[in-house]
Structures are given as structure tokens and as C-alpha cells.
Amino acid sequence: MQLHELKPKHRPKKKKRIGRGGKRGTYSGRGVKGQKSRAGRGPRPALRDIIKKIPKKRGYRFKSIKKKPQIVNLKDLEKHFPAGGKVTPETLLEKGLIGKVKGKMPKVKILGQGKLSKKLTVERCLISKSVEKILKGQKVTKKPKIKNKK
């Protein structure tokens, strides 16, 4: 026997439908007028009261689904990498400057906070404009952008 083969032993009792002619006429045992005589009477659902009490905020409350890159500053690169070192997402992960996001390697963006006195090779990282000026003479390789054809 399996779960989908289970059936009740007895038939469910049918609810008495009052106010449709027959033995219970006119007011059908509900009395005359008032809240108790009406259909759908009873307490308001508690959840609705809770929802109505919550203050409503104005404006757009949708959070972006777009994944944001992990941020690394120049001062961190200065501290953790030797001169002529290679900066990639993998090496940043090894050094503990970034972490995986949901088990996947995240995109990395290098920002210009701090100073960089040594030459580094930067690969597969996004770079801010302020850092682009600093790394002008150094070797920087970016991932090529692939445009989708529709």
C-alpha cells in the first residue's frame, strides 16, 4: 500500500444547507436581522488585521537581482601582493580578500582607495576609472565583452 492509495473508511458528512425551502423556512434558524443573520458573519481574519497595522512605505521597494562584484581596494593589493605579482580572482580568493558567492567565483572590481607603489599584472577583474589612470603603464587584461545577437 502506498500513500496515494489511502482512502477514508466513511463518507464525509454533508453540511446542512439552510434557508432553501423545506423544513427550515424563512429565517432558517438565524433570527431576524443583525450581524448573526447575515452570510459571511464572524470575526475578521487575524492576518488581515496584522497586515493593515503594518506601516506602508512610499516608493519603489524592489531590490535588484543583478549580482554586484566583490570590491578590492588598491591598499589591499599593496599589502598582499609582491612586486610583479599577478592579480586574478583566484589569487584574491587564496589571499582571503574575496569570498565565493553561493559556491561560485564572483566578479571582482578594483577600486582606487589607497596607493600602489609596485607594478602588478591584473587579469579578469573590473577596474574603476580612478584605478585605470594609476595602472596605465602596467599590464592589464580584461575579459572580452561578448555581444548577444538577436
Image: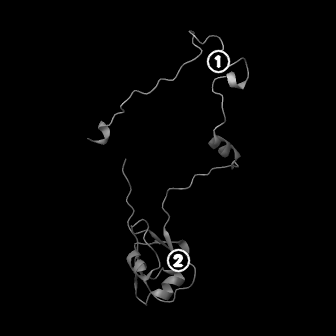
Image: 125 above or below 148: below
What is the distance, in whole Å, between disc 2 and disc 1 at their CAs?
82 Å
Image: 11 above or below 44: above
Which is more N-terminal, label 1 or label 2? 1
Q: Regarding mark 1 in the picture, which secondary structure is present there?
A: loop
Figure quadrant of the N terminus: top left
Q: Residue at x 37, y 59 (%)?
A: 146
Residue 15 position within the rendered picture, expressed as x and y whole percent measured from the top left: 51, 23
Place residue 5 in its image quadrant: top left
Q: Residue at x 42, y 70 (%)?
A: 100
Q: Is residue 75 left or right of residue 139?
A: right
Closer to us: mark 2 or mark 1? 1
Specify the label residue 131 is tagged with.
2
Q: Is residue 133 left or right of residue 89?
A: right
Q: Which residue is mark 1?
A: 29
Hey, what amino acid is under mark 2?
Val
Q: Regarding mark 2 in the picture, which secondary structure is present there?
A: helix
Q: Residues within 10 Å of mark 2 (few under 14, many from 20)?
A: some
Residue 123 position within the rendered picture, expressed as x and y whole percent measured from the top left: 39, 75
Between 41 and 85, which is closer to the camera in this rendering?
41
